[in-house]
Image (tube, helix red, strand yellow):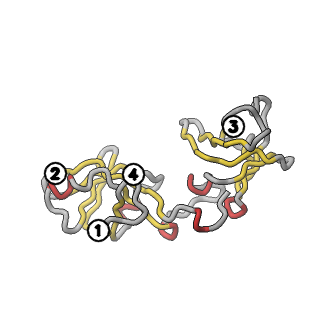
Amino acid sequence: MWKSKKDKPKWIIVGEVVAPWGNRGEIKIIPHTDFPERFGQMEAVRLFAKNAQEPMGVFVLEGCRSHKDGILLKLKDVDTIDQAEKLRGLLIKVGHDELMPLPPGRFYIFQIIGLECQTVTGEKLGVVTDVLPTGANDVYVVEPYPGVTKLKEILIPAVPQVVKDIRPEEGLMIIELLDGMLD
């Protein structure tokens, strides 16, 4: 559970530069967002090295277009293949105030990780440490508190029959235990 706002990530990844594109300095990015159209609305992008806490630069966005499984961006002052190649592997991140609003009942992964998982009867199970996309539904990985189970992690399917309530503002996820979940 987050103890304070300082524990929340400052920046959220929305894309990754995977390659230069063409000979005019465009870059191909793979979106890490359910809202790839956001790139067409952005005026600039912040680029980060893999584990950096602060951006290595802010680049004005001159162009954006979809291409197959990715998006092509043209950044101001990136005009050659060599300049674009130097950006390969960098991450595009946004601040919380730049996130696209989600419909009611939907949450960003960073809002789920760190929540305390409790049963509908109030039994404290542990803390959500990861979210696994499985295709059919996500699975929340919970690190159990000592004595809750012999399992190293509890896997919670993100389905309405199990996950009854998610309250990020309270740091809480309420679930209905199914038979065998703690075995």
**Gap in angstroms between the C-alphas marked 3 and 2:** 47 Å
Given contact means CB atoms under 8 Å apart, are the residues at marks 3 and 2 in contact?
no
Please report whichever mark, 2 or 1, sits nearer to the chain's N-terminal start: 2
The quadrant of the image that shows the N terminus is: bottom right
Identify the residue shown where x is 31% and y is 52%: 17
Mark 2 crowdedness (10 Å alpha carbons): few <14, some 14-19, many ≥20 = few
Q: Give the left or right position of residue 92, taking residue 126 as reference.
A: left
Please report whichever mark, 1 or 3, sits nearer to the chain's N-terminal start: 1
Q: Quadrant of residue 40?
A: bottom left
Residue type highlighted by circle 4: Pro
**Label 3 sits on residue:** 154
**Gap in angstroms between the C-alphas marked 4 and 1:** 17 Å
Q: Quadrant of residue 146?
A: top right
Badge number at residue 22: 2
Q: Nearer the viewer, residue 162 or 8?
A: 8
Identify the residue shown where x is 56% and y is 40%: 132
**Label 4 sits on residue:** 31
Residue type highlighted by circle 3: Ile
**Gap in angstroms between the C-alphas marked 1 and 3:** 42 Å
Given contact means CB atoms under 8 Å apart, are the residues at marks 1 and 3 in contact?
no
Residue type highlighted by circle 2: Gly
